Image (cartoon, rainbow, N blue to C red):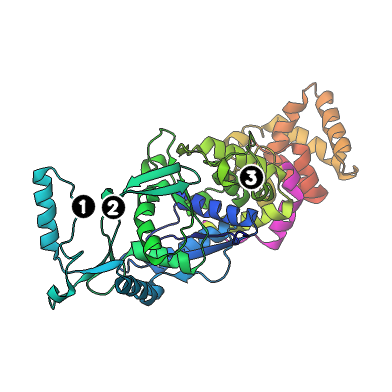
């Protein structure tokens, strides 16, 4: 019998930003679906109406879009499917796999308090589980699933291995509240079933939920999905990720200037491995990805490793793709888009900017020389390179450049010749030249800057500085 096509899903709650852990969960689901020619679905779990916001929903869409995690079909709202969830609960009631529970909150709390005092399990045991319907009062009731009381529920997890839960540890969870609203635990199962989800890949903080959700699958006679509960992300200190570890939201990493391919690479490597490969393309990740590569131990967020991977991607990226990433970064931080002239000169300069830039802000800092306008205002350190002697050398250099062929070899030869005439090393002439062209003491090679700026702009800047 052939296997059904792979269907995965990402199901965030829109109560805040797209968390870095949620982004990795989405990425693993996306990679697994794409690696197997399957479908990746998006479900917004917005049943908590008090905390769910449209702003948070849009932040999730924006984060997934930036990461390049395209979903198949329309995003599904869980709240919009409440009638279907309630319908399944009533089907379970009719089939005898769920029952009406008339216990009040006060009675439930009293049961638990007595159990605590007597040292018994505080799992609520409803007196209505096997009650004769003839004894039912005319009062509000919740619907509870009839969980098995004996034996074990076995979860065959692709990451955690076989997980066994004693059924006497499972409660008869509420599936429909007394106000008629379905619970999250029911809604998740119904949605996953109706969406045809074959693989549930999510954080291992949901592992306990899997056993409880299995009671609904079994009650409805539905096949359970393949489970894969992935370890959470920890900080560098090995503790659960929190605000003290720094950026938690995907948007913050975008604003820090990490290109999206680098972020995908890093998040993929965070808890998954393919041999010793550290830097790889998204295409390679899709080709290699399998659930077998996910480790059992929590991954540790390491900003230095992210920066290193980011540097590799920036250096290898096509210029047009890098310009697109810069546009995305500037939009994220609220900066104006680059003017067409800026894009053109930045494209020409890219070859001498990409090396050793680990983030987009670092690359733009290196590009300062070609994005700034005359007159160049040298910073404090650069100003010290423009003393009277240095200005004289720049004045002497200018006529030699005016009619020279504008090639690197020729430019290097002219500057080296002037340095030699003055009994100076090349660096002693390069520093005032750098100050004149960039207004900084750190920049790309002076010869790269001259080639990017062109003859007219180079001569104009040297003339300004020598004045």
Which residue is under mark 2? 170
Count residues near mark 3 (Cα–Cα under 10 Å), then give few for <14, some for 14-19, many for 20+: many
The reply to whether discs 2 and 1 touch (Cβ–Cβ < 8 Å) is yes
The reply to whether discs 3 and 2 touch (Cβ–Cβ < 8 Å) is no
Residue 429 in percent (x, y) is at: 75, 30
Residue 348 lies in the magenta stretch: yes
Compared with 433, 464 (above or below) is below
Residue 435 - label: none
Distance between the alpha carbons at the discs numbered 1 and 3:
58 Å
- Magenta: predominant secondary structure element? helix
Extent of the magenta region: 333-352
Q: Secondary structure at mark 2?
A: loop
What residue is at 90 percent from the left and 44 percent from the top? 403
Which residue is under mark 1? 123
Q: Would you say residue 176 is visible in this rendering?
A: no
Q: Would you say residue 327 is visible in this rendering?
A: yes
Which of 453/186 is in front? 186
Compared with 109, 236 (above or below) is above
Distance between the alpha carbons at the discs numbered 3 and 2:
55 Å
Q: Earlier in the sequence, mark 2 or mark 1?
A: 1
Residue 363 - label: 3
């Amino acid at each position: 019998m052939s296997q059904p096509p792979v269907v995965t899903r990402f199901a965030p709650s829109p109560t805040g930003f797209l968390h870095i852990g949620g982004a990795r969960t989405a990425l693993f689901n996306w990679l697994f679906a794409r690696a197997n020619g399957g479908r990746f679905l998006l479900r917004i779990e917005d049943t908590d109406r008090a905390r769910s916001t449209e702003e948070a929903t849009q932040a999730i869409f924006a984060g997934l879009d930036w990461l390049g995690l395209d979903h198949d079909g329309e995003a599904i709202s869980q709240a919009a499917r409440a009638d279907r969830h309630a319908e399944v609960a009533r089907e379970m009631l009719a089939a005898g796999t769920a029952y009406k529970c008339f216990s009040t909150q006060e009675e439930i709390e009293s049961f638990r308090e007595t159990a605590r005092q007597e040292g018994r399990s505080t799992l609520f045991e409803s007196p209505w589980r096997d009650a004769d319907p003839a004894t039912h009062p005319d009062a509000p009731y919740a619907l509870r699933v009839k969980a098995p009381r004996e034996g074990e529920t076995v979860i065959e997890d692709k990451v955690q291995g076989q997980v066994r839960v004693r059924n006497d540890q499972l409660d008869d969870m509420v599936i429909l509240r007394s106000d008629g609203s379905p619970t999250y635990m029911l809604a998740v199962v119904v949605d996953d079933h109706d969406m045809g989800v074959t693989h549930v890949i999510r954080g291992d903080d949901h592992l306990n939920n899997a056993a409880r959700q299995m009671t609904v699958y079994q009650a409805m006679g539905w096949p359970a999905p393949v489970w894969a509960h992935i370890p959470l992300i920890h900080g560098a200190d090995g503790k659960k990720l929190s605000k003290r570890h720094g950026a938690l939201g995907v948007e913050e990493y975008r604003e820090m200037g990490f290109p999206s391919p680098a972020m995908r690479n890093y998040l993929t490597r965070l808890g998954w491995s393919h041999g010793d490969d550290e830097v790889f393309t998204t295409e390679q990740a899709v080709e290699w990805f399998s659930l077998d590569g996910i480790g059992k131990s929590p991954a540790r967020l390491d900003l230095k490793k992210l920066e290193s991977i980011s540097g590799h991607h920036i250096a290898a990226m096509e210029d047009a793709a890098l310009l697109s990433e810069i546009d995305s970064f500037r939009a994220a931080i609220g900066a104006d888009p680059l003017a067409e002239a800026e894009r053109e000169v930045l494209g020409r300069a890219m070859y001498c900017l990409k090396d050793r830039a680990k983030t987009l802000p670092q690359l733009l800092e290196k590009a300062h020389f070609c994005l700034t306008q005359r007159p160049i205002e040298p910073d404090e350190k650069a100003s010290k390179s423009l003393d009277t002697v240095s200005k004289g050398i720049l004045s002497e250099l200018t006529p030699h450049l005016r009619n020279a062929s504008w090639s690197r070899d020729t430019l290097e030869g002219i500057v080296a010749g002037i340095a030699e005439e003055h009994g100076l090393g090349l660096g002693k002439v390069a520093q005032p030249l750098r100050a004149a062209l960039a207004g900084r003491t750190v920049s790309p090679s002076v010869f790269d800057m001259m080639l990017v700026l062109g003859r007219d702009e180079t001569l104009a800047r040297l003339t300004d500085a020598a004045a």
